[in-house]
Amino acid sequence: MLHTLKLLLPALIPSWNFFDIIVPSPRIQFSINSTQRDKNREWQLFRPHPQYISFGMMLKRMLWNPRWNESLFLMSCAERLLDYPTQHSEDEILIRITHDLVKDGRMVLEGMYLQFRLVLVKRVGQELVYESQSVALDTYIARVKHT
Amino acid sequence: MSLIEAIRYTEILMGLAFMQQSIEHLRSFRNEQLIFLARLILSLLLVAGIQTSWVTGLLLLSALAMLHRFQGPYNGGSDRMGLLVLCCLLLSDIAPTQYWQEVAFGYLAIQLVLSYFISGWVKIINPDWRSGQALTDVFQFSSYPVSESLRSLATYPRVMFVSSWYVMLFEILFPLALLNQYSLIIMLIVTASFHFANACLFGLNRFFWIWLSAYPSIIWFQQRLFVTM
């Protein structure tokens, strides 16, 4: 409870330093593997941005934008992982990747392993900065169903 | 605008903003749905003006449940602004006298001014913002642009330079708009347009609705200052 109240304080006495400096931005990439320590992992970008969005769609998103707002939350989790890693932030990302994979339904997930990593995109180049544990997808599929 | 009217308009606008946020979570995970369904019902009651003191208190509890569930704000600045508006409304509702009611609601107005002024100040002291490079970086490699095609705006340095100075100037000059009611209204149209552009280009729709909900406080505050002076 004390921790939750601590989280409330920045809202009551805000800093308002939005976009004061533009720092390298994390991207989430994930990999599905048949073994926990697969050497030949193929990494995919999680939720790549669309090439183009019409003005009509932008207007619609003024009222209905859940997927994008969830992606912003995952960006916060990624930034938290870089500042002070917690199981909560790692789980939020793993659960939502699993949810998308289950919803997509195109891959066989049973018995497979999931891992994600964070890549910082900079003005010039990219840098790998974080790798999660490789986890059994079955565990996270069960968590998605019961969360 | 009287204090009572300003508080009521803020309740309605904040309630609508919370409803929009809550509806977005109703198709999410079950433990999120429970918090946001409660929040949706409470926001409906607030908009309808039913037992507003109790409802704002319960909304604060739901906000604490959100902070606990997500271990922080779900959507950074917009959630924090929502909490600030909510706390100021609750404090002005339970304030023992009109003086303390004005202090609580005036705090929201002052924070709204600071939200623009400090944002402008921290940018203008940064050489990257003054040259347009920082905004170029936002479009080039941040995760905010809603589509890849928008990243091409980073290749127009003059557009980035002019846009940067436009944003920095209106943010830092925002307090001056309090000098006159008409200048304040014009400034609020400029800032609302800025939030609308951010919603379109960077998908920050929640910022637009929640910042708008604090606008009645500044309109009341400006009139209160003018009458006092």
Image (cartoon, coloured by chain):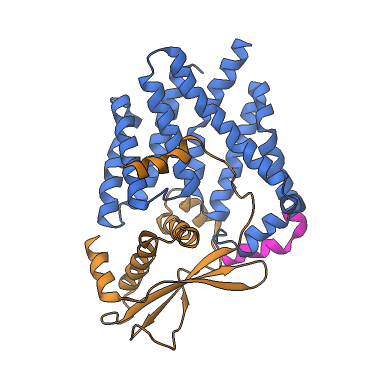
Chain colours: A orange, B blue
Q: Is residue A49 visible?
A: no
What residue lies at 29% left-to-right and 34% top-to-bottom? B58
Q: Is residue A67 rendered to the left or right of residue B126?
A: left
Q: Is residue B185 visible?
A: yes
To which quarter of the image does residue A31 belong? bottom left
Of residue A110 and residue A40, the one placed in the foreground of this image is A40
What residue lies at 56% left-to-right and 40% top-to-bottom? A15
Q: Position of residue B69 (x, y in %)?
A: 32, 51
Is-magenta flag for residue B151? yes
To which quarter of the image does residue B29 belong? bottom left
Where the C terminus of chain B falls, by quadrant? top right
Q: Is residue B135 rendered to the left or right of residue A50?
A: right
- Provide the residue span drawn in magenta: B147-160
Q: Is residue B111 above or below residue B17?
A: above
Of residue A123 and residue A39, the one placed in the foreground of this image is A39
Q: Where is residue A70 in the image (x, y as percent from the top left)?
A: 41, 57
What residue lies at 41% left-to-right and 42% top-to-bottom? A6
Q: Where is residue A53 in the image (x, y as percent from the top left)?
A: 54, 62
Q: Where is residue B30 in the image (x, y as percent from the top left)?
A: 25, 55
Q: In this view, does A10 lie above or below A115?
A: above
Of residue A65 and residue A144, the one placed in the foreground of this image is A144
Count of numbered marks: 0
Q: Is the magenta stretch mostly helix, strand or loop?
A: helix
Q: Is residue A139 above or below residue A80?
A: below
Is-magenta flag for residue B42? no
Q: Is residue A92 above or below residue B49?
A: below
What residue lies at 51% left-to-right and 54% top-to-bottom? B203
